[in-house]
Image (cartoon, rainbow, N blue to C red):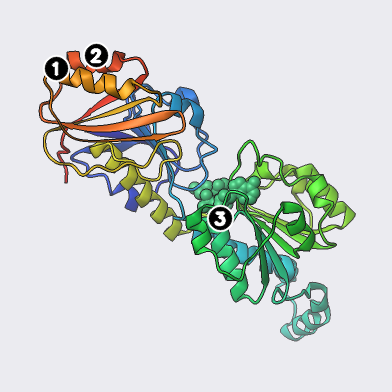
């Protein structure tokens, strides 16, 4: 029986991927085998020694202490692309709300008295509506920073709106490049994108290299009245720099999913409470994907969509499987195999993959290893952890 500790509201469709004959799911376990969460900021002290894996039902993993997870041999999973459409649709809403004063118009109408005669109301609306006029987004230029799962969808959507689209992504993967519409013009650096766009939408992760990336200096280079949209992460944008650019009028509007007190009550700011991924569809997609990845790991040791471990999938044959995480250094694997041979254990199948500082091995053996052998394996220099994975009881 595996125990899955959840944080945040996880879609029931995802939780249902864990058959209750083999998994307990709850929010308060003493010895969880795995953690499934959304935006909860996970403290190192919350990752108990029993935890074997962590899955983020979402894209960003900045709420998980990645480095210490890697050192402890804990794979961290995310769900690439599973909420991209939800974010894309909200970016479309953000661009439209920034171009037409829908918010001001709705507020104005709702503040009218319900005792006003209908004919008077009609006259007043016609007289006042010029205050809420805007402009169209067709023909304008959108700059997309970060052209991964979300950025590529946003780019495609903007082309459908009849916009020009320019993009910047210094780390674009080959897979992401294939997804990108050919009409998107590639910018060599962020400054040229910021200098050319009417709308700028951010879709990059928060990393040491991207924290505070959009600051007063960068914003000084935008065209008068540019709209900046941040549906990525708060830390990427320097709020003081944004307020300064709004005050100076270079930035026309700021639309963000990450409100800050200094942005409240401003007509040139549209604030949303981190709802980019808050659709039934996205929550379900993320939860199902995260749960399936956790199950594949707990049941078989297989790894798909990890942000710190290599991708590895070994078809299950028969017998017992051991999963070993070790430092990615010469000699560790041969030491492990020698120990198995010395204990007369026959290796039926095996796969070894590495990523940065760690390596991960799936080794199928014909006989279950005894406690002594597991201890010997754990003591091999460079071995981080050893798991014996029996064939799963639930299909
Ligand atoms: N508002 C929300 O609810 C919400 C929902 C989903 C994701 N997000 C955020 O959006 C981010 C992007 O999500 P995604 O699914 O598209 O991820 P992704 O990994 O598919 O794409 C991110 C892209 O950013 C690029 N990138 C990295 N550093 C860059 C830099 N310095 N400049 C420009 N591009 C850079 C990467 O090469 C990659 O192509 C996530 O990391 C998360 O923080 C927010
Ligand atoms: O879970 C959420 O609501 C937000 C998820 C989002 O920030 C992400 O990084 O995918």
The verdict on label 3 being within 8 Å of ligand 1 is yes
Dot 1 or dot 2: first in sequence order is: 1
**Residue designated by label 3:** 276
Image quadrant assignment for residue 291: top left
* Picture coordinates of residue 125, whole percent (x, y): 77, 79
Q: Secondary structure at mark 1?
A: loop
**Does the residue at mark 1 contact the one at mark 2 (Cβ under 8 Å)?**
yes
The correct choice, above or below, for 176 with respect to 59 in the image is: below
Could you tell me which quadrant the N terminus lies in?
A: top left
Q: Nearer the viewer, mark 3 or mark 2?
A: 2
**Residue designated by label 2:** 376
* Picture coordinates of residue 20, whole percent (x, y): 22, 42
**Residue designated by label 1:** 343
* Picture coordinates of residue 5, whole percent (x, y): 36, 34
The furthest residue to the right = 248
Other residues around mark 3 within 10 Å, as few (<14) / some (14–19) / many (≥20) = many
Q: Residue at x 57, y 69 (%)?
A: 182
- Judge left or right: residue 188 versus residue 172: right
Residue 94 visible to the viewer:
yes
Image quadrant assignment for residue 102: bottom right
The correct choice, above or below, for 56 with respect to 175 in the image is: above
Q: Nearer the viewer, mark 3 or mark 1?
A: 1
Other residues around mark 2 within 10 Å, as few (<14) / some (14–19) / many (≥20) = few
In this view of the protein, which residue sits in the foreground, 214 or 315? 315
């Amino acid at each position: 029986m595996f125990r899955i500790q959840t944080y945040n509201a996880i879609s029931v469709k995802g939780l249902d991927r864990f058959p209750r004959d083999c998994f307990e799911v709850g929010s308060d376990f003493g010895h969880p085998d795995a953690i499934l969460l959304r935006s909860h900021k996970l403290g190192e002290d919350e990752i108990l020694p029993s935890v074997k894996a962590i899955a983020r039902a979402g894209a960003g993993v900045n709420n998980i202490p990645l480095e210490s997870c890697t050192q402890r041999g804990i794979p961290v999973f995310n769900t690439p692309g599973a909420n991209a459409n939800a974010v894309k649709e909200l970016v479309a809403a953000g661009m439209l709300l920034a171009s037409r004063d829908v918010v001001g118009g709705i507020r104005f109408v709702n503040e009218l008295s319900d005792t006003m005669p209908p004919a008077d109301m009609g006259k007043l609306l016609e007289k006042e509506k010029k205050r809420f006029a805007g402009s169209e987004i067709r023909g304008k230029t959108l700059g997309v920073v970060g052209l991964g799962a979300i950025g590529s969808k946003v780019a495609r959507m903007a082309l459908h709106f009849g916009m020009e689209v320019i993009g910047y992504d210094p780390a674009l993967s080959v897979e992401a490049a294939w997804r990108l519409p050919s009409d998107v013009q590639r910018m060599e650096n962020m400054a040229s994108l910021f200098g050319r766009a009417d709308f700028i939408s951010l879709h990059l992760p928060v990393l040491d290299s991207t924290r505070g990336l959009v600051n007063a200096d960068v914003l000084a280079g935008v065209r008068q009245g540019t709209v900046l949209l941040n549906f990525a992460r708060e830390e990427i944008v320097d709020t003081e720099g944004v307020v300064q650019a709004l005050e100076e009028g270079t930035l026309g509007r700021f639309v963000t999913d990450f409100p800050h007190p200094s942005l409240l009550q401003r007509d040139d700011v549209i604030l949303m409470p981190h709802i980019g991924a808050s659709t039934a569809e996205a929550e379900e997609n993320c939860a199902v994907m995260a749960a399936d990845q956790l199950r594949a790991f707990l049941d078989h040791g297989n790894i798909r969509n990890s942000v710190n471990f290599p991708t590895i999938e070994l078809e299950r044959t028969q017998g017992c499987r051991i999963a070993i995480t070790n430092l990615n250094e010469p000699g560790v694997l041969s030491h492990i195999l020698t120990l198995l041979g010395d204990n007369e254990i026959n290796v039926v199948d095996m796969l070894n993959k590495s990523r940065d500082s760690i390596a991960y091995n799936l080794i199928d053996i014909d006989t279950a290893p005894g406690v002594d052998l597991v201890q010997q394996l754990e003591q091999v220099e460079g071995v981080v952890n050893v798991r014996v994975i029996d064939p799963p009881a639930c299909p």
